[in-house]
Each structure stands twice: as C-alpha cells, then as structure tokens.
Image (spheres, coloured by chain):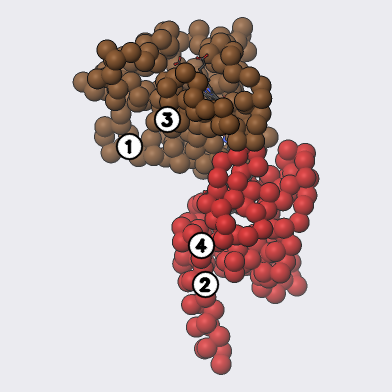
Amino acid sequence: MKTLLNLSVAAMLLAGGAFLYADDDEHEEHENHRSSRVAQPVTPQEKATVALYTKECGACHMAYQPQFLPKRSWDKTMNTLDNHFSTDATLDPADHKTIQNYLATHASKNDRMSDMKGAVALRISETPYFVREHREVTKKMVTQPEVKSFANCNACHTQATNGSYREREIRIPNYGRWE
Amino acid sequence: MKYLAIVSFFSMSLMAASPEVVQYMNELSKTAKVENSSFNGFDAVRGKEIFTSTHTGKQGKPMSCTSCHTVNLANSGKNSLTGKVIDPLSPRANPQRLTSTKEVTKWLKRNFMDVYAREGSAQEKGDVLTYIMKN
C-alpha cells in the first residue's frame, strides 16, 4: 500500500509537479509519502540496492533521485562513467549493472520533463522542467562558493537527500528562506 | 633480529591498514619489482611527493591530491569539483580508511586520473598508500 502510494505520488509529480510540492495543510498527513519520492525499499535486496546507489552515486555529490531523468539519460550517464563531467566515476562491473538497472526501473516515465528536442540530457539542471522551476533563482545565488552550481541541490533544498523539495524547506546560503 | 623486524612491520601495518589492504600492498610490491628491478620497497617520502605535487589532471587544469584531501590528512577535505565534504583520509583519524581493497583500488584509479590524467603504477600506488598510512 505504501509503495503504491509513493509510486502514484511520483507519477503525479512527473505529470505536473504541483501536487508533491503543494504546501497546504490538507496534504500534511501525507507528508511521509510525499517526501519520499523513491518507493520505499521493502525486501532486503531492494534495500541493499538503494544503499549501493546512495553510496556510489552519492560519493562526490548527493545521490540524485532517479525520477528526475528518463531512462535514456541514465543509460547515457552509465555508459560514459569514465568521463563523467570530466572526472572518472567508473564502477566494478557487478555494481555497474545493479545501479544501471535501479536507475532504469525508477527513471522518469514522462519525457516532457526532459524534452531536449531530441538531445539526451545528462544534467537534471539542464532539463526544461528544471530551468522553468528555477527561473527566479539568480546567477549569484548559484555561483557563490557555498553552492558552486545547480548540481548541488542540497545546498538550497535542505531535505533534498530525502527526496523532498518543498518551498518551505529551501534555505539559500547567505539569502535565507525562499518563501 | 630478523624476527623482530617482521613483528614490528606487521603491527605497524595492522595499525594503519586492514589485513586485506596489507595483502593488496604486498601484491603491488611484487608487481613493482617486476616492472622495476631496482625497486626496493615502498617509500613514504616518494609517496608524499606524489600526494602533494601539482599536475595537469583529467580536467586539463592544475590538480593535486591535496586539492581535495588538503595537506593535513587528519582533517576533512572538500571535493574541488563539487564542493562535497570528504572525511579525513588518515586511517588514524578515520578508522574506515584503507580497510577495503575494493574502495582503495576504485579511488586510486579515479583519483590518479583526476590529478595525473593516467592510472598510477604499482610503485606509485604503494608509495602513496605508505604515505597515507603514516599520516
């Protein structure tokens, strides 16, 4: 049941984005579900996979939620790890396979979110959906040393590692709350 | 005398790296000997030079191991590419370090690429691990 709820929440997010982030009290009781956009791992094997993903893809930056990009983006990322944003992020073959499957299973099913007019997005932060959501965020807020780049989601979204991006959780370094 | 030397080597190794990683270093040592017949054991002084000198890395910019791990290995570092904090590299300050050969080989491959734009040789890897163990 919980898994189902989480999945449907994720689906709604991908369809529009409004529901998950709505801040009204009416939805408060669903907080837990809303804030975990990745379906909760149930079996020990799923837990191990999530732990592996979080460790390996969270070693240099936060582990991004797979739902932010479609499968073809993740496949491209996984096929170019030897030159991943100019660094080497290669994995051993077994871990590579597990992570690629995990990303494929939980990827965004909605290509509207990452429509790049045919191009395959490697960055979440270059997708039209992301650009639209962040159009009011100034360049100075992003390039300051405490943030460095949009890739550093959790510099501003204090609950990003838990998969929650609601407005009231935003604290921009040296600027404060967004609301 | 010989007996004593072995005992003290062993206890020192145990203090700074897990048996698994000590075993890995023994393999590196064998390879280093094959690749360089004058090789005569790993050296922390050479390791320090590898760790602190600056080179043109994979990003085409000047880089050093200290760019991310800082010069004091007992302190936390910061990934110069992403800004993420890195726990101390020194096994004394951070007992998790040098406990898993899988972790060590993975990061040495990546990090030599970052700094030297190539993989490290067996001797270089052994030297730099010896340096890290002593810090």
Chain whose colour in the figure is red: B
Using the rendered image, report if marks 2 and 3 lie on a common chain: no
Residue plotted at (55% across, 48% down): B86
Neighbours of disc 2 within 10 Å: few (<14), some (14-19), many (20+): some
Q: Chain of mark 1?
A: A
Neighbours of disc 4 within 10 Å: few (<14), some (14-19), many (20+): some
Give SS at disc 2: helix
Quick one: A126 or A156, which is closer to the camera?
A156
Q: Chain of mark 3?
A: A
Q: Earlier in the sequence, mark 3 or mark 1?
A: 1
Q: Amino acid at mark 1?
A: Lys
Q: Amino acid at mark 2?
A: Ser
Q: Chain of mark 4?
A: B
| Residue under numbered circle 2 | B13
| Residue under numbered circle 4 | B93
Coordinates of residue A1 in the picture (x, y in percent): 21, 20
- Tell me whether the residue at label 3 lies in contact with that at label 1, contact meaning CB atoms closer than 8 angstroms: no
Q: Tell me the distance, in whole angstroms, between the alpha carbons under discs 1 and 4.
A: 30 Å
| Quarter-of-image position of residue A98 | top left
Is residue A123 visible in the rendered image? The answer is yes
Per the rendering, the mark at residue A159 is 3
- Tell me whether the residue at label 2 lies in contact with that at label 1, contact meaning CB atoms closer than 8 angstroms: no
Quick one: B27 or B130, which is closer to the camera?
B130
Residue plotted at (68% across, 35% down): A86
Drawing shade for chain A? brown
Residue plotted at (39% across, 39% down): A51
Q: Amino acid at mark 3?
A: Gln
